[in-house]
Image (cartoon, rainbow, N blue to C red):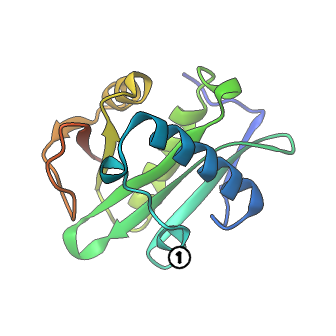
Amino acid sequence: MTSDPSLRLVPLDPGHPGAQALIAQSEALMSALYPAESNHFEPADGLRPPHGSFIGAWRGERLVGCGGVKRFPADGYGEIKRLFVLDSERGRGVARQLMARLEAELVGHGLRLARLETGIHQPEALGLYRRLGYAERGPFGGYALDPLSVFFEKSL
């Protein structure tokens, strides 16, 4: 899929009101799908420099998606966090473009391994990550084994 020229991907502070609105929608969805103990909400501060990056996807003046990375240089990987796209934008390649940008952020910081955690009740996300070359793995970092979680990684 080619990139969408009407979509702008730019660094965004996760505390920006638009980012906070998308994060709130994402948390509401995750809370409806999973019990509290299976949700791993990254605080906004964890996605700010120097240990993280956060990207907004804009269509015109409207923020339609977001995503972040948290870097773990001592462990040699970065984790994709807070990927979310508005319902009205799903199926238009926004998540794919955000993932490419987040992966480039990791590579730009010298990290060649991306990891992420998602849930079993998100078939679109699972399909996207598999299509992008992510392979299932066990829990990493501070995660525990959870039958509602799926863990992935990809060499960059």
**Residue placed most toward the observer, 7 or 86:** 86
Coordinates of residue 2 in the picture (x, y in percent) = 59, 25
Image-quadrant location for residue 72: bottom left
- As drawn, the residue found furthest toward the right would be 61
**Image position of 10 with respect to 86: above or below:** below
Image-quadrant location for residue 88: top right
Look at 40% across and 52% down and name the residue there: 80
Going by the numbered disc 1, the residue's amino acid type is: Pro
Coordinates of residue 13 in the picture (x, y in percent) = 66, 67
Look at 53% across and 74% down and name the residue there: 45
Report the side of 12 relative to 51 (left or right): right
Look at 29% across and 56% down and name the residue there: 112
Labels in figure, total: 1
Coordinates of residue 147 in the picture (x, y in percent) = 18, 37
**Residue placed most toward the observer, 136 or 99:** 136
Look at 37% across and 55% down and name the residue there: 40
> If the image is split into quadrants, where does the N terminus sit?
top right
Q: Which residue is mark 1?
A: 49
**Image position of 75 with respect to 66: above or below:** below
**Residue placed most toward the observer, 119 or 101:** 119
Report the side of 127 relative to 152 (left or right): right
Assess disc 1: are there few (<14), some (14-19) or many (≥20) residues with their C-alpha within 10 Å of its C-alpha: few
Q: Secondary structure at mark 1?
A: loop
